[in-house]
Image: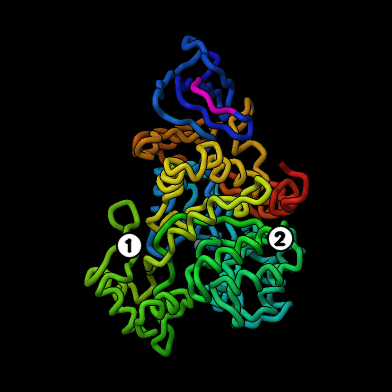
């Protein structure tokens, strides 16, 4: 038996944790990185793969995506791995759906789940009692979710309920995520300001900062300035931003004929459409709004009559999108620094089963634009994300690290090879559908160990989430 299973030759190795950026070779044995050097002897490996002209990085970790989407049938896993993702946080769940899918559809991915709590899901209305919240938070943390997501931008809760979720989730040693907005504010920069106040210095992951700078409150440049200042002064907050033009919301309509999602309502208002079922239908007809639908093995945007038919046929329970995110907000959120550190910690996709997995494609555009170095991009899409979750063996290519590797062509952002835990996950668009792995805390592991599902147990004590950005974790 040879010393190595795989040997990747002549790739540009970009590994900011180890200050590496050079053309060289990486060897893998079993599920670990076994050697990294300028040159490794080809006779030592079972399989030698020439990756000249390509870049090899630690696997992309998407800190905010949505796999368990309506009608997706596993498309989210396929769409993630095709764009080089090896680990992801599903930012809403449901955990039961992921547990049911991850072995069958998982594509070998490592998935952590934050479970969303909103009226009709775990709680009765927008002002649940502390006791009601305590019960539901514990239930979700016991069922394998690493934490709880407040989805206030779409389904606002009272400030008190939002406060209680953040505080109780932290008390129960879970990971709290917040798409900002309450009944007092909204999915905007005022909601961001409020969310930081509601955290009261406790750890909180605030989702997609760019989405609060759409110009709903004031000039988007002023909103950006405010958002960056808030984050600079809040070391307890970790955050990501995404690079997609489209947003995503739920197309459901309530008993009064009004779209249920507040983000959807705002998107209609922003272009002068009536906030109603009819207004949404009109927006779909003129292709301002699109529907996300399963086309073949992937989710895609569909428009006009086709979209309206699909939306109605599914009783409005579909994903809807609007091209409403601003490019300059995306650019500032990705690049802004304070004392040499990025203000927004990571670049996420907020995609998965939503067709906007552009972490690498748009991320590389920013590298070509000289807004980021390639090493900084890897920091924001792999290294820092690994630390956000306390995944010590991921996010870098040290010897002994998990063999999670993404290899891509820097000229066209096409992902050539994805290795997860030393297993081939994807080669040139062809997916090897290995069972996925659920990332859980000890608490979730206790409940799930009897099930036939592969687990990766993390300790949030090791995470940037709990340590905070002044916690000494470099
Ligand atoms: Zn999201």
Measured as percent of width and height from the top left, residue 220 is found at 50, 68
- Residue 135 or 403: which is nearer the viewer? 403
Choose top left, top right, bottom left or bottom right for residue 3.
top right
For disc 1, the marked residue is: 293
Measured as percent of width and height from the top left, residue 308 is found at 27, 74
- Is residue 33 visible in the rendered image? The answer is yes
Q: Find the magenta span and give its range.
A: 20-24
Mark 1 neighbour density, 10 Å: few (under 14) some (14–19) many (20 or more): many
For disc 2, the marked residue is: 233
Residue 466: mark: none
Q: Is residue 22 magenta?
A: yes
Choose top left, top right, bottom left or bottom right for residue 145.
bottom right
Residue displayed at 52% across by 56% down: 332
Residue displayed at 47% across by 76% down: 261
Residue displayed at 59% across by 60% down: 114
Residue furthest to the bottom in view is 256
Give the tally of numbered discs.
2
């Amino acid at each position: 038996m040879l010393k190595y299973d795989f040997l990747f030759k002549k790739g540009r190795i970009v590994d900011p944790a180890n200050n590496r950026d050079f053309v060289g070779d990486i060897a893998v044995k079993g599920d670990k990185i076994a050697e990294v050097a300028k040159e490794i002897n080809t006779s030592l490996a079972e399989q030698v793969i020439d990756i000249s002209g390509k870049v090899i990085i630690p696997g992309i970790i998407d800190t905010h995506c949505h796999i368990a989407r309506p009608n997706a049938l596993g498309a989210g896993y396929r769409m993630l791995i095709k764009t080089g993702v090896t680990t992801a946080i599903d930012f809403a769940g449901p955990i039961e759906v992921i547990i049911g899918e991850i072995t069958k559809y998982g594509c070998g991915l490592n998935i952590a789940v934050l479970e969303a709590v909103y009226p009709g899901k775990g709680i009765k209305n927008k002002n649940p009692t502390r006791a009601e919240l305590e019960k539901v938070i514990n239930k979700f943390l016991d069922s394998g979710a690493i934490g709880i997501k407040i989805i206030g931008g779409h389904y606002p809760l009272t400030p008190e309920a939002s406060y209680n979720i953040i505080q109780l989730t932290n008390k129960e040693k879970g990971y709290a995520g917040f798409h900002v907005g309450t009944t007092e504010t909204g999915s905007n920069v005022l909601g961001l300001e409020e969310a930081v106040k509601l955290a009261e210095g406790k750890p909180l992951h605030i989702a997609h900062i760019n989405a609060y700078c759409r110009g709903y409150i004031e000039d988007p440049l002023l909103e950006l300035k405010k958002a960056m200042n808030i984050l600079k002064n809040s070391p307890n907050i970790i955050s990501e931003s995404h690079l997609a033009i489209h947003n995503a919301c739920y197309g459901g309509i309530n008993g009064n004929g009004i779209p249920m999602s507040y983000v959807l309502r705002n998107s209609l208002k922003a272009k002068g459409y009536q906030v109603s079922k009819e207004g949404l239908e009109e927006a779909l007809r003129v292709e301002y709004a699109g529907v996300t639908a399963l086309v073949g093995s992937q989710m895609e945007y569909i428009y006009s009559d086709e979209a309206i038919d699909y939306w109605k046929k599914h009783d409005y329970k579909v994903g809807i999108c609007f091209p409403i995110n601003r490019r300059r907000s995306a650019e500032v959120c990705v690049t802004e620094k304070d004392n040499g550190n990025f203000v927004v910690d990571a670049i996420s996709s907020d995609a998965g089963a939503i067709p906007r997995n552009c972490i690498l494609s748009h991320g590389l555009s920013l590298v070509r634009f000289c807004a980021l170095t390639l090493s900084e991009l890897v920091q924001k899409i792999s290294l820092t994300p690994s630390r956000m979750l306390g995944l010590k063996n991921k996010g870098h290519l040290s010897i002994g690290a998990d063999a999670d590797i993404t290899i891509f062509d820097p000229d066209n952002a096409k992902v050539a090879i994805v290795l997860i835990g030393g297993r081939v996950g994807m080669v040139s668009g062809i997916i090897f559908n290995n069972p996925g792995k659920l990332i859980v805390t000890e608490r979730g592991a206790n409940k799930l160990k009897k099930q036939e599902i592969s687990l990766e147990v993390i300790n949030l004590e090791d995470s940037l989430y709990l340590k905070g950005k002044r916690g000494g974790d470099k």
